Image (cartoon, grey):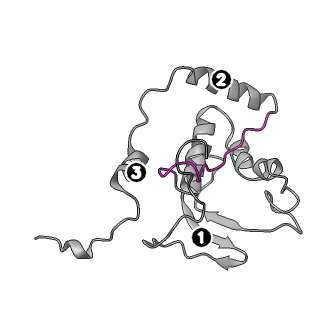
């Protein structure tokens, strides 16, 4: 039976971009082991490793999804899942001077929530099991939207 191609949903992302999301990373670049060791030692000594999306730099990076991958990479270094979560929340808020309002669940702070299925302290990959997002007290519609446009402007060319 032939499919009617007009009924197949299209993606707003080019095929070459989507291919980068599922490809095997290949061999680590020279120096990776040194950086990984340094980051683990830095964390063990009390240093704070941040996890943040680089959404504005590359067409391959999807807001949110890239953060889950980054937290996974941090735990792959041997850093605890709790520190990876703190690096994506509280410590990131501290770096941008917003810890008074963001980064942790406390009285008086803004509270947006991502409800996940699973225990991210046992497996950081559980953060990808998003079941609900609540922003400004409203449940966000997270279904696929082919008309979605990234609100963060992309840099065009080098040095911009």
* 86 lies left or right of 153: right
- Assign a secondary structure to mark 1: strand
Q: Which residue was labeled with disc 1?
A: 132
Secondary structure mostly taken by the magenta-highlighted segment of the chain: loop
* 57 lies left or right of 98: left
Tell me the magenta residue range. Answer: 47-61
Q: Residue furthest left?
A: 1
- The location of residue 3, given as percent across then percent down, is 17, 71
Is disc 2 surrounded by few (<14), some (14 to 19) or many (20+) residues within 10 Å? few
Is disc 1 surrounded by few (<14), some (14 to 19) or many (20+) residues within 10 Å? some
Q: Which residue was labeled with disc 2?
A: 37
Residue 110 vertical placement versus 65 (above, below) = below
* Viewer can see residue 114: yes
Distance CA(mark 2)–CA(mark 1): 36 Å
Distance CA(mark 2)–CA(mark 3): 30 Å
Circles 2, 1 touching at the beta carbon (< 8 Å): no
Closer-to-camera residue (68/155): 155
């Amino acid at each position: 039976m032939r499919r009617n191609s007009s009924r197949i949903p299209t993606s707003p992302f080019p095929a070459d971009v989507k291919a980068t999301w599922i490809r095997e990373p290949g061999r680590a670049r020279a120096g990776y082991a040194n950086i990984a060791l340094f980051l683990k030692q830095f964390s063990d000594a009390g240093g704070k490793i941040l996890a943040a999306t680089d959404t504005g730099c590359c067409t391959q990076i999807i807001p949110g999804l890239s953060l889950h991958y980054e937290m996974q990479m941090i735990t792959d270094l041997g850093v605890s899942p709790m520190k990876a979560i703190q690096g994506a929340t509280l410590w990131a808020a501290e770096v941008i001077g917003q810890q008074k309002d963001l980064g942790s669940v406390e009285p008086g702070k803004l509270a947006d929530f991502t409800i996940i299925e699973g225990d991210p302290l046992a497996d950081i990959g559980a953060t990808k099991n998003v079941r609900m997002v609540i922003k400004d007290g409203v449940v966000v519609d997270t279904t696929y939207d082919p008309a979605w446009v990234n609100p963060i402007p992309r840099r065009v060319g080098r040095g911009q």
